[in-house]
């Protein structure tokens, strides 16, 4: 099954992707995670990506599309894939269409005014990458899964988040219509608990 998770920054794509990848036994491919790994490793892609991510802007399509095309050729994608954060522009969606058939696009819908709080309160494990929220964990500083240190993402400050939300509205939201017109869009109310959103996606994916 080839699935895309669509949604604004903070909508819960990463949170749901971890659970869905486990349930459907398909690889979770997050372009944001790929960029952050490259930034950590100070690779040429990481250096380019950082200059955009720090400003809350999208990394140019040609860089992002090539990374995803290469990744989809890996053996583990023969059984399908779960894309998280890609495509994010119509140009990326058109490029993907040329190399792969998408079965379902899950749009996780959360009111924009709730997203700022979700993102600025997020803490991620520096070791395994799992996301937490201070509303649920309080001032806990260690990951409950692997004991790694919980940190705040560099682009999770208020100014950058506002820019990311603006970019989402202008460049990514048009993909909702794009995939609706192709008959593969599944809308899910993301303003519910993590488990409820997961149940709702699972029900609709079958
Ligand atoms: P990326 O890493 O993809 O970030 P994003 O899209 O901004 O989304 P987030 O990761 O912030 O949110 P999420 O939807 O995964 O939410 P999460 O599950 O963590 O991209 C980062 C940057 O990389 C981009 O800005 C861009 O520069 C670049 N980039 C990436 N892909 C690109 C592309 N294709 N093209 C060009 N550039 C690209 O949840 C958020 C918080 O809410 C957490 O604290 C979580 O615990 C909490 N939460 C989750 N679900 C719920 C719930 N149901 N109820 C309450 N709280 C919840
Ligand atoms: Mg994410």
Image (cartoon, helix red, strand yellow):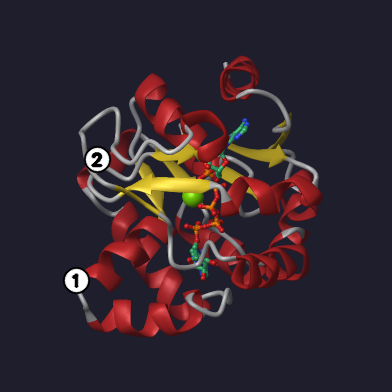
At horizontal 55% and vertical 80% (from top left) the residue drawn is: 55
- Is 204 placed above or below 120 here? above
At horizontal 48% and vertical 42% (from top left) the residue drawn is: 14
- Is 67 placed above or below 146 here? below
What count of labels does the image hold?
2
Q: Report the side of 25 relative to 52 (left or right).
A: left
Q: Position of residue 57 (x, y in %)?
A: 58, 77
Quadrant of residue 91 within the rendered picture: bottom right
Quick one: quadrant of the C terminus?
top right
Disc 1, SS: loop
Disc 2, SS: helix
Q: Residues within 10 Å of mark 2 (few under 14, many from 20)?
A: few
Quadrant of residue 102 within the rendered picture: top right
Q: Position of residue 126 (x, y in %)?
A: 27, 51
- Is 171 placed above or below 136 here? below
- Is 140 placed above or below 35 here? above
Of pointers 2 and 1, the one earlier in the residue sequence: 1
| Label 2–label 1 contact, CB within 8 A | no
Q: Position of residue 166 (x, y in %)?
A: 74, 69
Q: Which residue is mark 2?
A: 76
For marks 2 and 1, give the one nearer the viewer: 1
Q: Looking at this view, is 50 or 97 the one in front? A: 50
Q: Which mark is residue 137?
A: none
Q: Looking at this view, is 199 or 11 the one in front? A: 11
Q: Which residue is mark 1?
A: 41
Q: Residues within 10 Å of mark 1 (few under 14, many from 20)?
A: few
């Amino acid at each position: 099954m080839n699935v895309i998770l669509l949604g604004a920054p903070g909508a819960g794509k990463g949170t749901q992707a971890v659970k869905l990848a486990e349930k459907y036994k398909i690889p979770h491919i997050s372009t944001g995670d790929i960029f952050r790994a490259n930034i950590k490793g100070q690779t040429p892609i990481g250096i380019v990506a950082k200059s955009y991510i720090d400003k809350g802007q999208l990394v140019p399509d040609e860089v992002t599309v090539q990374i995803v095309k290469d990744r989809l050729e890996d053996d583990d994608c023969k059984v399908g894939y779960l894309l998280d954060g890609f495509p994010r522009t119509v140009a990326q969606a058109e490029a993907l269409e040329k190399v792969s058939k998408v079965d379902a696009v899950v749009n996780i819908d959360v009111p924009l005014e709730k997203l700022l709080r979700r993102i600025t309160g997020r803490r991620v494990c520096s070791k395994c990458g799992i996301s937490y929220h201070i509303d649920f964990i309080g001032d806990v500083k260690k990951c409950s899964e692997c004991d790694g240190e919980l940190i705040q993402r560099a682009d999770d400050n208020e100014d950058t988040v506002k820019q990311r939300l603006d970019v989402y509205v202008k460049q990514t939201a048009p993909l909702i219509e794009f995939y609706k017109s192709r008959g593969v869009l599944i809308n899910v109310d993301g303003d519910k608990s993590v488990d409820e959103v997961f149940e709702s996606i699972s029900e609709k994916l079958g």
